[in-house]
Amino acid sequence: MVFLNWDKLPWFWYGFNHFGFAMLMVVLVPALLALVFGWLAFRSRVTGVYLSIMTQALSYAMMLAFFRNDMGFGGNNGFTDFKDLLGFDLHKDSTRVVLFVATAVALAAAYLACRAITASRAGRVIRAIRDAESRTRFLGYRVESYKLWTFVFSAVLAGIAGALYVPQVGIINPSEFAPINSIEVVIWVAVGGRGTLVGAALGAVLVNYAKSTFTTGLLAPYWLFALGALFVFVTIFLPKGIMGLLPQRLSRDKATDAPATARAAQPAE
């Protein structure tokens, strides 16, 4: 990769030339960052829109910091010109196919993991927290612990997704921290179907396909306006997203959308 033409990498990059160490950091670094931020936020009972504002502010602050060349993360250019992975040329079609398959496998594994969590007792408690946080706390559950665990787990999934994204795209720079990317994720979920696992993945595929299609022609300057209009449309006319159009017997994730407070596990002892 290209790194500001430095002849020596900063000390914190030592070890990343080993694949195993790099993969370990893919999981540990996002998890540690989420653990620290989440512990501080949830113990202060920051919730709802305030938590959203804080996470957006944190990502924006990181974007501004990473744009500085002296931070050692590539500055404005970021990282680019990735050539190989484990000795395989990233520009070959065969390597790209393998990475695509690895991405599909990772998506399937993430879905199964999330499905197992939502079907477990912990998942019922998490849904109860979503529907009635105060009531769940009064039942004796340590709400902050459940929220922190979920926050850290989602950060790990995001780290794995980023590790698969960069080799296929070939570049990564601090602009990925921009708030618009977080807003796009919300639109993915709204389009696919809130409260479902399949809907989130389906929305991501459809919105990104539309983005790839409409940002390469005359409509490129209007894409953000179209994205905003799409979010308003699905919020008003399709509150349950595309998954809401399917018969209930085909929506395998419908259980995750039902209020869970009344059927949460028994109060903690």
Image: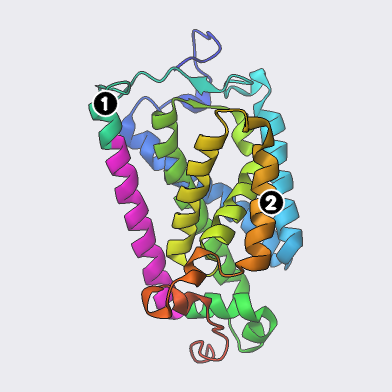
Instruction: Provide the residue span drawn in magenta.
Output: 99-122
Q: Secondary structure at mark 2?
A: helix
- What element does badge 1 sit on? helix
With respect to residue 88, does 146 lie above or below? below
User: Which mark sits nearer the N-terminus, 1 or 2?
Assistant: 1
- Classify residue 189 as left or right of residue 137: left
Q: Can residue 120 be seen by looking at this rendering?
A: no
Between the residue at mark 1 and the residue at mark 2, the CA separation in whole angstroms equals 37 Å
Q: Nearer the viewer, residue 102 or 11?
A: 102
In this rendering, position of residue 61 left or right of residue 187? right
Circle 2: is it few (<14), some (14-19), or many (20+) Cα within 10 Å? few
Q: Residue at x 55, y 65 (%)?
A: 241
Image location of residue 86, percent across then percent down:
27, 26
Disc 1 residue type (three-letter): Asp
Neighbourhood count class around disc 1 (C-alpha, 10 Å): few under 14, some 14–19, many 20 upward: few
**Residue 115 placement, left or right of 38:** left
Position in image of residue 29 (x %, y %)? 50, 43
Amino acid marked by disc 2? Ala
Q: Which mark is residue 93?
A: 1
Q: Specify the quadrant of the image occupied by residue 42.
A: bottom right
Residue at image mark 2:
229
Q: Quadrant of the N terminus?
A: top left
Residue 146: percent from left, percent from top: 55, 71
Which residue is drawn at the image coordinates 42% and 45% (left, top)? 160
Tell me which secondary structure the magenta stretch mostly adopts: helix
Residue 238, numbered label:
none
Residue shown at the point (51%, 60%) measured from the top left: 192
Residue at the (66%, 79%) spot, across then down: 133
Q: Is residue 184 above or below residue 192?
A: above
In the rendered image, residue 24 lying in the magenta stretch gets the answer no
